[in-house]
Every structure is written in C-alpha cells, then in structure tokens.
Amino acid sequence: MSGLRIRAIYGLLILIFCYPQNVFAIGRAEETAELVTEEGTPGLPLVQERVTLDYFMANHKTAPFTAQDLTIAELQRRTNVFFNIISIDSGYWDKYKVMLASNDLPDLIFTNVADAKRYGMEGLFLPLDELLEKHGKNILAAIEQEGIAEDMRALDGRIYFFPKISLQQPEPFMIRQDWLDACGLDTPETLEDLYHMLKTFKERDPAGGGQTIPYGSLMYNDPSICYLNAFYRAFTVDQDFMLKAERMVWGPAQPEMKQAMRYLNRLYAEGLLDPEAPILAKKQWEERVSAGRVGMIVYSSVRTDYFTRVLRQTDPEAKMIGMPPPIGIDGQRHVAPMPRFSTDFCMVVSKDSPHAELIVKFFDYVFSPEGRMIVSYGVEGDSYEIRDGKPVFSEKMYSKEAGWNMFVKAAIGGRRIACWPYDDAMVQQLRGTLSLEALQLTWPHVDPPTPILNFDQQELGIIETRYQDLKDRTSEFLLKFLTGELSVDAGWDDYIGELKRAGLDELEEAYNRAYARRYR
C-alpha cells in the first residue's frame, strides 16, 4: 500500500474522532450504508449438515480464544461450519514444527506469512488462487482494495494464506503530563526539545529522593531490536533492512545511525536514559514505571491508561499521555512502518484437507459485508446496536466482567481468525481512552511499509547463514556506542568492518535481488 494511502486512512480516523458526531455521520454516510448492506454475502448456511474443521492454533494462556466466543459462535451458527480448536498456549512454534514434520496436518493452521509462502511452495499448504477465483470474491476484493496482492504472493506467484487485515497500532512516545506541568514545560517538538525535557526532569527530580528516571527504555539487552527504534526513525533509519533511494540497505549501517547513536549516548552519559536499561527484564521495567520513577517511555499505547490507573493509586494527579514523535533530522516526524495486514499471523489450508472449497467459502463469508459486521461488532442487540444507521457498541462492552476485557472475551476484531474488520470498530473500542489520544497523535506520521520480499533458495541460504550473525554484531556494537564503552566516532569504521565480515554486503545483495525481481 502506498504511503499516501496509509496517511489518508490515518488522517480520516483523526478527522472522524476529533469532530462532533453529526459531522461524523455525514462524512461517513457512504461507508455506514455499506456496513449494513448484505450485498455480496454468500447464501447461508454454507452447508446443510454441520462440518467441523480442525484448527491448529497458538493461543493466549490467560485470555484464551475459543470457538464459543461471541463473534466466532455467530459465524459458526450462520454458516454451519464449526471449529475444533487444537489450542497451544506455550511452545507453539516447536510443536508447530513437529506437526509439520509428522505430515499429519489439520485442516487449518496458524502461521506467519514467511512460513506460509515457504511451506506452501514446498507443498505442505494449499495454493488458494483457483479457489479464490471461484469462491472468494470478497477476499479478492479486500486484497485489491488494500493493495496487498503483491505482498501476499509467494515467489511462484501464488497465494497460500488468508490474511488478517486490520488497523495497526503503532507504539507512541508517552510522557508524564503531571511532570510536564510541574516543571512548566510544553510537549517537546524537536529532538533538542526532548533532550531539554529529559534534562529538566533529571534536575527537578519529580519522583523525589534522586529516584527520577527521565527516560525508561525497554531494551531486552539488544539495542538492535528494542524500543530505541522510535529514536532511530527520527534520524531516518531503521533497526533492520529498509528501503533507501530505491535500494534495500541495512539500517544500522547507515551514516544517519551514527548520528542517532551520538544522540542516545548523550542521553545515557548524562543519566537521562536509565543506566540499567540494557539489562532490565520487562517486569523490572514495569515496576519502575509503576512506582512513579519514569518520565517517558515508548511502548504499546494501551499503557497510557494502564500506568495512569496504577500511578493514581498513590498519586491522584499522575497522568501518562501520548505525544507526537519528535521532528526528525529531515524536518519530518516519523513512526516505524506498519503493514496493513499482519505478517506474524495468517491462516493456511493444509494440502490434505478434504474441506478446502468449504474453507474458502467460509472465509469469503467472513470477508463479506455481513461477516465483517460480525467480526467487527459482534451480534446486534448484544454487543452493539444500530443508531442513525451506524453500528455502536453497547455500554456493557466497556465494562470489566470478572477482570475480562469484554472486547477480547467476545473476540471482537476476530482475534485468532483471518478477517477484515472495519477500522471504525477498533477505534470505537478505545472510546474515551488515553490510548486513543496517543494513537491519534501517532497515526499521521507512520512511514510507508517496507516491501515484503520473496527470496529464492540461494537468497534464503544467505539469509539463514548470515542474518543472525549480522544482527549479533550490530547489537554488540550499538550497545557499546550507547553506553560509551566505545566512542561512536572512533569506533564507527571498525563497526562497519565487522558488519561486512558478518555478511553485510552479501545480505544487501540478496535483498536487492529480491527487490529488483519484485519491481522489474
């Protein structure tokens, strides 16, 4: 999908939720009409006699997805197609590999896009193109409308999976509003403003007793895969391969990364970045933020509400809010690109399933206007109602029942099935939250997604043997640059030399061959 289209989507969402309801209704009249139409919906039930599909699936241990969840139960009831969920709540990918090796495959399998393409071409998963042409017009319409066909196709040109298309939630910068107020500061606009804010937090010590941590970064002991990427983006680079001047390059090897590491080392050296960040576990990081010691974080937007609730147990004035990303070195704000469909989750049909045609018909229903209403909002009269021609969630959905998030419990958004929920439904779920405010400040600045490339066997061989070594060498040096163990300026040439010995040039060549093949 083009960057222009992404920014248009996010801009529309901000327009919708920043203006009065009557403006919303007028501006969305056409889409609202689409939401309640049944045009394009397959005849129901899909089969007269009940059919049960085995679905091998990674599940959530404490909030499991089940076939009895409201939206899933309704889809099953209407179609007469049911799921027998083979639920794996720990060690999924190891068990998944054993299952594939057994050659005794269930009808449907939870996997990622890379595996769907790889094992599809190896014959384990069914190519869907012919079945989609015959029975999947709604799925194909979604793929065309979202502009994701080329990203979905494998190297052989075929499609092997059903996608989960949804509005992604980028991870915003979040700051303590009450600390800003106490220090007489405005929300920072530039990188230098951000530095000044953190320095003021350090000097004024809002946490008291010298306990203030201006910026608490979650790093997992690896600066090449952590939340520091929000800063890298301000310097126009990424922590992985990225597109630059029509070439795929290794982000951490770009000259702009040198500037980024100088900036971050400055924060670390002056005690503005938690000195223990490189070694903290997630639980320890959460404890520091929850104890009121941290002024700024980068993480999932829902933590604005979560940490505000926790902090207010001891400080009624505490408030964690989102902020726009700082203006970068190119004069623009940047947020890491996010694809329109999940690359970490999709569904595939096994080669031996006797129900392949029915499976495509089932998901075509899920992608139809009626099916989209169900996965987006649930059941009318239960989880939502129609007001002025527009679906609106029932008040009970915003309550907490036995500690459950009701949207999760009802599987609103589909959760563990491939689907295409309406963006409006996801935003409605966040009604009145600090999380929504944070996302509204972040969405307009999401960069265009990096192309999803298909690699041939030679390229895969290079990636499998060289990529991890490149990541390891990158992480080793970035950590040294961050902490000052190695000077960024004095050590940069050695760093690039190590990356080249780890396979930088071979990997960039492999990525660029794949890129050229896609766009030739």
Image: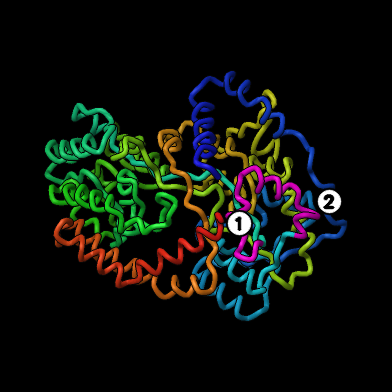
Q: Residue furthest front?
A: 520
Residue 146 shown in magenta = yes
Q: Is residue 244 left or right of residue 210?
A: right
Q: Which residue is mark 2?
A: 45
Residues 196 and 154: in front is 154
Q: Is most of the magenta stretch helix, strand or loop?
A: helix
Q: Residue at x 39, y 72 (%)?
A: 466
Q: Which mark is residue 152?
A: 1
Please say if the residues under marks 1 and 2 sit with CB atoms less than 8 Å apart.
Answer: no
Colouring rule applied to residues: rainbow
Q: The residue under label 1 is which amino acid type? A: Met
Q: Earlier in the sequence, mark 1 or mark 2?
A: 2
Residue 333: quadrant of the picture: top left
Residue 474 vertical position relative to residue 5 in the rendered view, above or below: below
> Where in the figure is residue 518, as x and y percent of width and height?
56, 57
Whether residue 130 is visible here, answered yes or no, is yes
Q: Which residues are magenta?
A: 130-157
Residue 268 vertical position relative to residue 310 in the rendered view, above or below: below
Q: Is residue 438 left or right of residue 60?
A: left
Q: Residue at x 51, y 26 (%)?
A: 15
Q: Is residue 85 left or right of residue 471?
A: right
